[in-house]
Amino acid sequence: MRASKGKQEEYRTISRRTILKASAAMFAAGMLPASAVFGKVLDRTQDQILGPFYPIMSEPDRSGDLTRVPGGSGRAKGQPVIIRGTVRNPDGKPVLGAEVEIWQANAAGRYAHPDDTNPAPLDPNFQGFGAATTGPDGFYQFKTIKPLHYPAGSIGIRPAHIHFDIRGRRDELVTQMYFEGDPYNEKDSFLQSVLNPDALIVKLLSPTAEEPEFMVAVFDIVFRG
Ligand SMILES: [Fe+2]
């Protein structure tokens, strides 16, 4: 027997609701990509150049704390900052085993790199090079210091930034993370070369009770994994 028009509508609503619920549950269980449920994929984090100062003098620090070096005399100079975030694929799924590397200038704008001609002083307590591997939740974190802007010859002054190289099984993303309020952001040809510069700029958040000295910046990353 055929159901009445009103009944048919009810069945349709229920079944759509049921499917959505089941899909959401499958997404939560990691069985379905977000794109299949929400019809949307995340934009891949925008690329930036590797730059001339990729570290060549040392292995990356794997302690998670770049503000101290083994055998050093104390904490690196500058504003301590915790950089943290989640690495996801475009479907929104956390990427396990992504290798996240960061490198940066110190609080005076100088890289621990032989090709850096900036006369600003090196900081013996700061190498500015770290690596972390994401777990099943895609999370990474580094304790570091906020770098300073630095002169880059004919390019002009580069705003404060931290370089990232994220490697997965099928993708590698090289980018740079910038800080909100830096007066050089708007004139920087590298930052302004991307479609959405704001997506590469982080805000420094207040410290937490557990780490009262460290400002906090969240920089989530999307790549293919
Ligand atoms: Fe740089």
Image: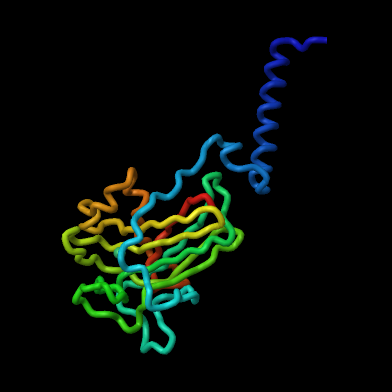
Viewer-nearest residue: 157 or 65:
157
Can you give x and y, in whole percent of width and height, for residue 103 in the image? 38, 68
Q: Vertical placement of 44 versus 219: above or below?
A: above
Q: Residue at x 38, y 64 (%)?
A: 206
Can you give x and y, in whole percent of width and height, for residue 95 in the image? 56, 55
Q: Is residue 206 left or right of residue 111?
A: right
Number of numbered labels in the structure image: 0
The quadrant in which the N terminus is found is top right
Viewer-nearest residue: 146 or 55:
55
Q: Is residue 74 left or right of residue 166?
A: left
Q: Vertical placement of 14 versus 141: above or below?
A: above
Q: Residue at x 29, y 52 (%)?
A: 191
Q: Residue at x 42, y 50 (%)?
A: 45
Q: Residue at x 24, y 65 (%)?
A: 149
**Residue found at the far right of this picture:** 1
Q: Is residue 81 left or right of residue 86?
A: left
How does the figure colour the protein chain or chains?
Answer: rainbow
Can you give x and y, in whole percent of width and height, for residue 102 in the image? 41, 66
Q: Which of the 4 quarters of the picture holds residue 8?
A: top right
Viewer-nearest residue: 144 or 113:
113
Can you give x and y, in whole percent of width and height, for residue 107 in the image? 28, 73
Q: Vertical placement of 117 versus 178: above or below?
A: below
Q: Which of the 4 quarters of the picture holds residue 39?
A: top right
Q: Which quadrant of the figure shows ligand 1?
A: bottom left
